[in-house]
Amino acid sequence: MYEIVSLADVKSWLNISGSGDDDLLNSFRAAVTAFVETYIGKKIVMRQFTEYYDGTGKNKLLLRNYPAYVVYDTTTSPEEPTNITVHDDIDREFDDTTLIDASDLIVYPDIGQIGLYDDEASFYKAVQNVKVEYWAGYTRFNVISGQNNYLDIKEGTGSEINIAVDEAKTRDTVWLGYSAEDLASAIQSALNDDDNTALTYTVSYSHATQKFTVAATSTFSLLFNTGTNSQKSMATLLGFNGDDKTGSSSYTSDDVVIGVPSDITLACQQLVDQMWQMAPKGKGLLLQLSKSMANGMGSMSNIVDKLPPVAREILDGYRREMF
């Protein structure tokens, strides 16, 4: 469910067509995900966590998973996090009376740290007395003007409508790009706010299926292939195969789209590739340290590191530095 690299990407990397090896490749994806998350020391694909921590008597707490995805209330000053809850309860009942007010929380998303604004405040020093519910992991989508920010649509039999979505945003120095939910919201707003659209649109992302759905109150078309801006469409970003989508009031991504940084995806591709080479259905070579050649022509050696050098360099950059 939370594999870092999609089956479609794995098959494209290995140049495999058909579905005969899907079960094997899916097992590789799961194994690679487990290995990478253990190696890095955190979960990769965004999900919600409920975790318990020992209070240290200090005013800062380091979360197990990061970067944290934080939604802020922009009507407050300073802006308050709205999708993270923190309880501090030495009796471990964790009811409303032990909930720390959002105005007292400061979150450092990149490093996964929670702090308390009041310098005199601190978490009680006790065992498993702090309960935190939060979202963390990577689900980021970069929208770049003139490259992948257009949806060309047609409502019923009407004329083509060209919808441009705002470029990927940056919040301070925290994260570049949209979260899946923010991207869905931005697309929905762009569709509904355009003066030329008459239908009402709903755009959503499912973390369970890792796909986007674009729906409307009546039949419409997504002109990914024949639209004016087909070369600058959002098709790939949203997991669509690039064909026009017609005849329906709702369309869901053809492929899963995860939003994991491309370098982590590359490292995972290399690891899956290595597993495939080791498998009998692949070349079956990497398990052989030495093999005799025919006709007495000597032997060949094939000794490889368990972790490809490029993959190791990439993944080392995502391991948490203690401070």
Image: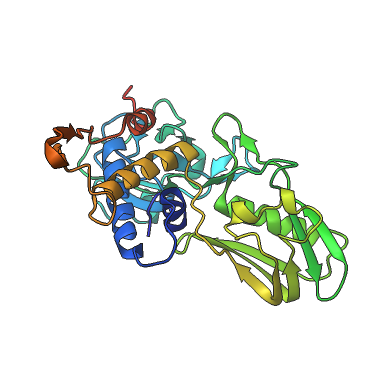
- 100 vs 159: above or below: above
Q: Quadrant of residue 268?
A: top left
The answer to whether any part of residue 105 appears in the image is no
Query: Is 217 placed above or below 228 here?
Result: below
- The residue at the far front in this view is 295
Q: Position of residue 178 (x, y in %)?
A: 60, 45
Does 280 sit above or below residue 64? below
Instruction: Give 112 or 286, whichever is nearer the viewer.
Output: 286
| Quarter of the N terminus within the rendering | bottom left
In-front residue for pair 214/323? 214
Asked if residue 274 lies left or right of residue 258, the reply is left
Is the C terminus in the top left, top right, bottom left or bottom right quadrant? Answer: top left
Question: Which of the 4 image quarters holds residue 313?
Answer: top left
Name the foreground residue: 24 vs 161: 24
The residue at 88%/67% (across/down) is 159
**Would you place residue 126 above or below residue 7 in this image?**
above
Image location (x, y in percent) of residue 157: 84, 75
Residue drawn at (59%, 62%) of the image: 204
- What residue lies at 40% left-to-right and 49% top-to-bottom? 4
Left or right: residue 30 versus residue 146 is left
Q: Residue at x 40, y 67 (%)?
A: 19
Color scheme of the displayed model: rainbow
Residue 241: horizontal and vertical position, in percent? Answer: 60, 60
Instruction: Report x, y in % for residue 61.
Output: 34, 34
Query: Horizontal placement of 65 versus 206: left or right?
Result: left
Disc tally is 0
Say if residue 169 shows up in the picture. yes
